[in-house]
Image: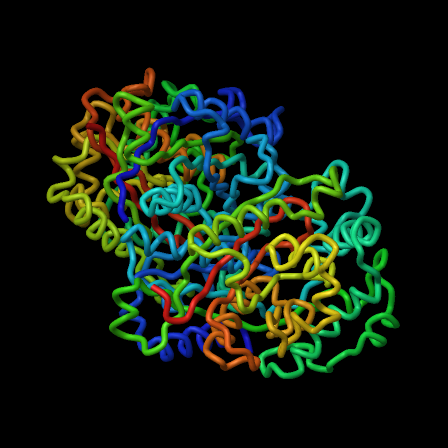
Amino acid sequence: MNVDDVVFSASKRAFDRAGITREDLDATVLTGQDTFDGAAISDGRKVTVAGGYEKPSMRIQNGGGAAVHHAIAKIRSGKADIVSVTAADTVTTDPRLVSYTAHEALFARPIGQNNHQSYGFITATQLEERDVSREDLAATAAKNYAAAAENPSAHRREGYTQEDILSADPVVGPLTELMLAPLSFGAATCVLMSEEIAADRVDRPIFISGSGLNSNRYGYRDMETRLDQPTLRKAARTAYDDAGIDADAVDAAEIAAHTPTFELLSYETLGFCERNDAATLVADGVTASDGTRPVNVSGGPLATNPPNTGGIYRTIAAAQVLHGDLGSVDAETALVADNDMHLGEPGRTDAVLILEEGAT
Amino acid sequence: MTRDVAVVGVGYSDPDSFTDYRESTMSKEEQAYDAIAEALEHGNVEPADVDATMFTTVDGFEGTFRVERTLEVLGMGHDVPVFSINTGGTAGGSGVKVAYEYIASGEYDVAVVYGSPTFDSVLEGQQVMNTAAEPLYERHFVTAIQMGALPSSAYMDAYGPTEDDFATVAAQNYESAALNPYAHRNRARTTEEILDSPIVSWPLRRAMTCPVSSGSAAMVMVSEEMAHELRDAPVWIDAIDSISNTFSSGYRTYEWFPKLNTLAGRVYDNADIDDPRSELDVAETFNPYIPFEMMEYEALEICERGEAKHLVREGATARDGDIPFNPSGGVLSTNSGICASLSRHTEIVLQLMGEAGDRQISGTERGIAHSWGANLGQFHQLAVFSRD
């Protein structure tokens, strides 16, 4: 299917499920990046099939979580009641080459920095500084693949084991091919409404009770500090405060972990465990799909990684978990931690959303 | 929660940076730093007070993809969001709109919108620009100059403006540019000189089309509460919105800008404007191809459809007319990519603050800023600014 087909089908399906027509839509927000679409100003092609003809549209390039963050502000400002957020991926590209051009030109590019290289740096530092082994990384990846095998919307559904992952081709530093996210295709749309409109139109709305967003400065300095993921930490703090909760209230999470490295680090950063306890959560099955706090029931980016669409995919997955349509846990509060680290770790923007079923 | 939103500061990079993009001696970072530093100083805002930044861009032109990830122009740490906003030629206005909505929502109190030169990293942007068009049929013939020529020739056929009219509007812009230290083409030109310049694509002559420029602009926007603390006379955003047309241009109408007219109706309603010609004092619009400026008079309801030629012949939109358009010299004089889109807004703010220097129009209380962009002008964006 081409981009028109996937954007139209995702948008139409979302509109139908939200009980709206194109005419009800006040505005559309797109997310995505020209280089992953092979075209300049690539939101132009998507906006009309996303229902945006004669409507206000916007494109936020920092990812789906940031696009949802902006859509929330648009509704909270009183400038819109119904906003769709859409993205699509249909173009075959080499994400390593694309991400290379997103790196600093004078110093980082000459030494070949790209997304995978940046993950390798962080992972090597993690193995030195945290109680984490390559086996722990592989176990975390295997947990994601096991979840993806049960998710009909996942890309890699083969259920790779810890042994498969460790014996896969080495790529960079400690990371093997199966510890790195693939390039996936697809499209996704979610519809956001003001509280008043949702109460009238939707039987079981999911409320976004908190959100936070921050960006980091580019650089490869202070690697140990980077393990703490300060931008994610602050975005999560803002989102928790906004929702009036703390980490203990989170029943499930979808995390944009492009390698298992970031999933384990994020357990600490988001407050799910103390420092150096992350691998234990995986080993004890706490974050497995049937655990007490499942993380990436969708299979996460290791299973499904459309670069433009990933953040919306994760937001929808979190909503599906709350609705009981994905996984088997009884969750009332879910967290989405999205970012644009498909381009690499330096210069990242983190967006955190708190989703609650039936909250106000 | 809805709060009023004000602009308290604007800034530009050094006047010398507004030049041919191939001759600029300042990097993207240097130019953006200068513009942001000047805007913060102008608005009496400390860098530490900035809650969020909106970087406006078209990635393909930048050479570095998602270039804002590597720009450290605000000396940020890990706690200032950097939004990357790309909607083509309207991206400058889109940045203002995103900042406006965030501040109106209560999420942020202080936001900096900035655009650094967009074309500085590519030797030839045309191939990049072509990829914005529909790939099977349109990409083969729609280039930047055709984007200007198709509507211009259709407009000429439909309503009869002459080459002399186009040259008159261009001359008005060059006269203003000569007063603007941040203009690239900053020499006044006569209508004869403009009409003597070579045809590029009918009916556009070289002097009726924009150059490719360097330069950076920034704008500091704040909540209503902060605005009163920071400045005696902030400039308010009364209304701001955008509109999308079809992607495939075969469905479009070319002899005027109907979508801009629809957008103007919505924005004027929100700003309680009934008679734009009498209620507006100044306008900055997207005029990289000079016939566009006349088409915009009509779509923005400054006159009836087809009547722009009379407006031009009366001098109504000249510097000393009753509704001056593009007193900066417009995009025709200075086309620093997405910065040029943001500059429409910064120029209106300076006009309303009474700080536009030699290009100041007297007695300005309300003005509009417009931008146009994406495939054959798929997007329009429009904002109304006013002062107390």
Q: Determine the residue positioned at 67% across, 54% down.
A: A274
Answer yes or no: is residue B131 visible: no
Q: Determine the residue positioned at 75% across, 74% down.
A: A142
Camera-side residue of A237 and B74: A237
Looking at the picture, how far across and down is residue A135, in whole percent? 84, 67
Camera-side residue of B206 and A24: A24
Q: Determine the residue positioned at 85% across, 56% down.
A: A173
Looking at the picture, how far across and down is residue B82, in whole percent? 52, 43
Q: Would residue A225 appear left or right of A60 to someone viewing this image?
A: right
Quadrant location of the C terminus of chain A?
bottom left
Q: Would residue B323 appear left or right of B379 to someone viewing this image?
A: left
Q: Would residue A212 appear left or right of B75 to someone viewing this image?
A: left
Q: Determine the residue positioned at 42% across, 54% down.
A: A244
Quadrant location of the N terminus of chain A?
bottom right
Camera-side residue of B269 and A191: A191
Residue located farthest toward the top when viewing the structure as drawn: B358
Give above or below for B265 relative to A253.
above
Looking at the picture, how far across and down is residue A81, in whole percent? 29, 61
Give above or below for B28 relative to A53.
above
Looking at the picture, how far across and down is residue A161, in whole percent? 79, 78
Camera-side residue of A227 and B62: A227
Give above or below for B35 relative to B368.
above
**Residue A21, image quadrant:** bottom left
**Tell me, what colour scheme is on the image?**
rainbow
Answer yes or no: is residue B33 visible: yes
